[in-house]
Amino acid sequence: MVQLETRQLCKTYPSGVQALEDVGFTLERGTFLSVIGPSGAGKTTLFRILNGMERADSGQVLHAGQRFEQARGRKRRAIQKTIGTIYQDFCLVEQLDCLQNVLNAALPDMNLLTGSLGLFPKDRREEAEALLEQVGLGDKRFASVQELSGGQKQRVAIARALMRRPALLLADEPVASLDPVTGRQIVELLRNIQQRQGVTVLMNSHNLELARTYSDRLLGLREGRVVFDGPPDALDADALFRVYGGRSA
């Protein structure tokens, strides 16, 4: 089953920079896809359109067959509930503990009063604790996020994204601010989640080695256009040149 599909996506910013041009691809459910390309290729713009933070000028985005770019109100929120988002800068509330940060992902499902008072149902608290255990931070649930290392913060962010019970995980440069060893551990964790839970993962990555090692498929962007789409072992010297040109990958 197709989890995500884009058709002829185009996006030009007011400055005149064309970030995306005629971008189209499909992503099967349960696949790990990495989007690669040099800085300025359009990876982050694509990511922001896929999770609804920006709108394309033209084209279509379909999540499990539902038109996302046309959806409004309740229908749009229902689609967004199927998407979990992980950012390179974590986007956590540093002053809160790990458990509270994960529970915050459940706030959109609660009414205003119980949400503002932090009265989370018992089953959701247990779910949040289980997710922290899953990402290796069961003993840190009451630790303040500001006390954690970068790798630990990203694990909390992954648990928070999973709290949405997503069908699709969007990870935007999730290891960009981490050291190489920790970065590999985080991508291994995402791969494990994808394989064991059947969650579809789309990762933007500047790290070509990790993308090739852990992905089922690579999508190469250059100057806003798709110039490669295939398995990692098909990314030969010719394909690398199309994606990166004369730049070092």
Image (tube, rainbow, N blue to C red):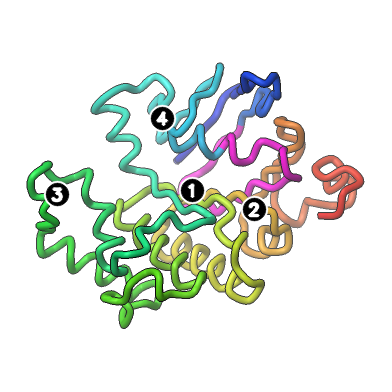
Up-down relation of residue 188 to residue 104 (above or below): below
**Can you give x and y, in whole percent of width and height, for residue 217 in the image?**
64, 50
**Can you give x and y, in whole percent of width and height, for residue 210 in the image?**
67, 63
The numbered mark, 3 or 2, whose residue comes first in the sequence reads 3
The numbered mark, 4 or 2, whose residue comes first in the sequence reads 4
Labelled pair 4, 3 in contact (Cβ < 8 Å): no
Q: Distance between the residues labelled 4 and 3?
A: 31 Å
Up-down relation of residue 136 to residue 44 (above or below): below
Please tell me whether mark 3 sits on a helix, a strand or a loop. helix
Closer mark to the observer between disc 3 and disc 2: 3
Q: Give the residue at mark 2.
A: 205
Please tell me whether mark 1 sits on a helix, a strand or a loop. strand
Up-down relation of residue 119 to residue 11 (above or below): below
Q: How far apart are marks 3 and 2 (CA)?
A: 35 Å
Chain part drawn in magenta: 25-46
| Residue depicted at 41% across the width and 24% down the height | 67
| Residue depicted at 54% across the width and 23% down the height | 56
How many C-alpha atoms fall within 10 Å of the one at disc 3: few (<14), some, or many (≥20)?
A: some
Q: How far apart are marks 1 and 2 (CA)?
A: 11 Å
Which amino acid does the dot numbered 1 rest on? Answer: Leu
Residue 148: mark in rendering:
none
Dividing the image into 4 quarters, which one contains the N terminus?
A: top left
| 26 falls in the magenta region | yes
| Residue 155 or residue 13, whichever sits in front | 13
The numbered mark, 4 or 3, whose residue comes first in the sequence reads 4
Q: Give the residue at mark 3.
A: 115
Q: Give the residue at mark 4.
A: 65
The numbered mark, 3 or 1, whose residue comes first in the sequence reads 3
Which amino acid does the dot numbered 2 rest on? Answer: Ser
Q: How far apart are marks 3 and 1 (CA)?
A: 25 Å
How many C-alpha atoms fall within 10 Å of the one at disc 4: few (<14), some, or many (≥20)?
A: few
